[in-house]
């Protein structure tokens, strides 16, 4: 059974850096094709994809937030960390980490089943 | 960036009804689309991936279809637990994944 859980501060001040940790179990981030992503959801709005890190340390970021985001992994400790710099009140949201499962491998490319398992989310408020 | 237009934004239906939600992509995304159900205070839950593949454990009254730019999520024989908000997600244009704006399904 795959489980993920986010942890981090509930409140950060504007201009500060947010650091969130995703602790997971039930899978390995050394398995070919597997990834862990981050998604946030402002109150009452649709989710927004932020970043993903794959088993081979390939990292992808939302183009609109790329300059502010860093994602890293610690495979032995089964953790993925997201850092977001220069936080602003508009970054107030619930932040989720999620497992990304490949369902096919064709012509050297993995095809993914979206995000198949999610953490419970951590609510982050940006306010002075 | 690929835009996902989801419709309707809200929908009222009764238990036992059949409803269809649509997502349209601003360009061809093949079948790289998944559907999620979200209930208040909870994380999204994967229902459908690759446009039409039912995730393990999801009831067969949920079905997905479409290819290219137009996709549908159909729920047959609505059950009380199906009233929630639904989102589509494209990940064709990776790394730029995009969620639809959501459809809130309410009890009539």
Image: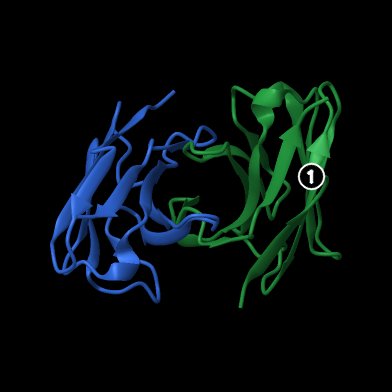
Chain colours: A green, B blue
Q: Residue B26 sits in which quadrant?
A: top left
Relative image position of residue A102 (x, y in whole percent): 50, 60
Q: Residue at x 69, y 46 (%)?
A: A123
Q: Report which residue position mark 1 lands on.
A: A10
Q: Tell me, yes or no, if residue B66 can be seen here.
A: no
* Mark 1 Cα shell of 10 Å, populated few (<14), some (14-19), many (≥20): few
From this view, report whether residue B71 is shown above or below residue A45. below
Left or right side of A103 for B83: left
Q: Percent position (x, y) of residue B92?
A: 41, 39
- Quarter of the figure that contains the N terminus of chain A: bottom right
Secondary structure category for the residue under label 1: loop
Q: Is residue A126 above or below residue A119?
A: above
Position of residue A123 in the picture relative to residue A99 (left or right): right
Name the chain under label 1: A
Please state the total of marks drawn on the protein image: 1
Q: Could you say which quadrant of the image residue A4 lies in?
A: bottom right
Residue A64's x, y, as percent?
60, 22
The residue at the point 37 percent across, 45 percent down is: B88
Point out the image quarter for the C terminus of chain A. top right
Q: Nearer the viewer, residue B78 or A19?
A: B78
Q: In the rendered image, is residue B8 in sight?
A: yes
Q: Residue furthest front?
A: B108
What residue is shown at x 36% (from left), y 72% (from top)?
A: B58
Which of B30 and B84 lies nearest the eye of the viewer?
A: B84
**Where in the figure is residue B61, as x and y percent of width and height?**
22, 70
């Amino acid at each position: 059974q795959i489980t993920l859980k986010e942890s981090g501060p509930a409140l950060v001040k504007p201009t500060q850096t947010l650091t969130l940790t995703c602790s997971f179990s039930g899978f390995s981030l050394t398995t070919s094709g597997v990834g862990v992503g981050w998604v946030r959801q402002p109150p009452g709005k649709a989710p927004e994809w932020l970043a993903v890190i794959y088993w081979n340390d390939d990292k992808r970021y939302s183009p609109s937030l790329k300059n502010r985001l860093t994602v890293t992994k610690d495979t032995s400790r089964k953790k993925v960390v997201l850092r977001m710099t220069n936080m602003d009140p508009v970054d107030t949201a619930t932040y989720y980490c999620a497992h990304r499962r490949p369902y096919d491998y064709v012509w050297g490319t993995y095809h993914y089943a979206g995000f198949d398992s999610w953490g419970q989310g951590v609510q982050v408020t940006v306010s002075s | 960036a690929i835009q996902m237009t989801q419709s309707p934004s809200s929908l009222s239906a009764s238990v036992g009804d059949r409803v269809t939600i649509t997502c349209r992509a601003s360009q061809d995304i093949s079948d790289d689309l998944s559907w999620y159900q979200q209930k208040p205070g909870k994380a999204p839950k994967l229902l459908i991936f690759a446009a039409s593949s039912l995730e393990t454990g999801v009831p067969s009254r949920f079905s997905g279809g479409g290819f290219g730019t137009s996709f549908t999520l159909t729920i047959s024989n609505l059950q009380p637990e199906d009233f929630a908000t639904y989102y589509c997600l494209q990940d064709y244009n990776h790394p730029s994944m995009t969620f639809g704006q959501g459809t809130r399904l309410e009890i009539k």
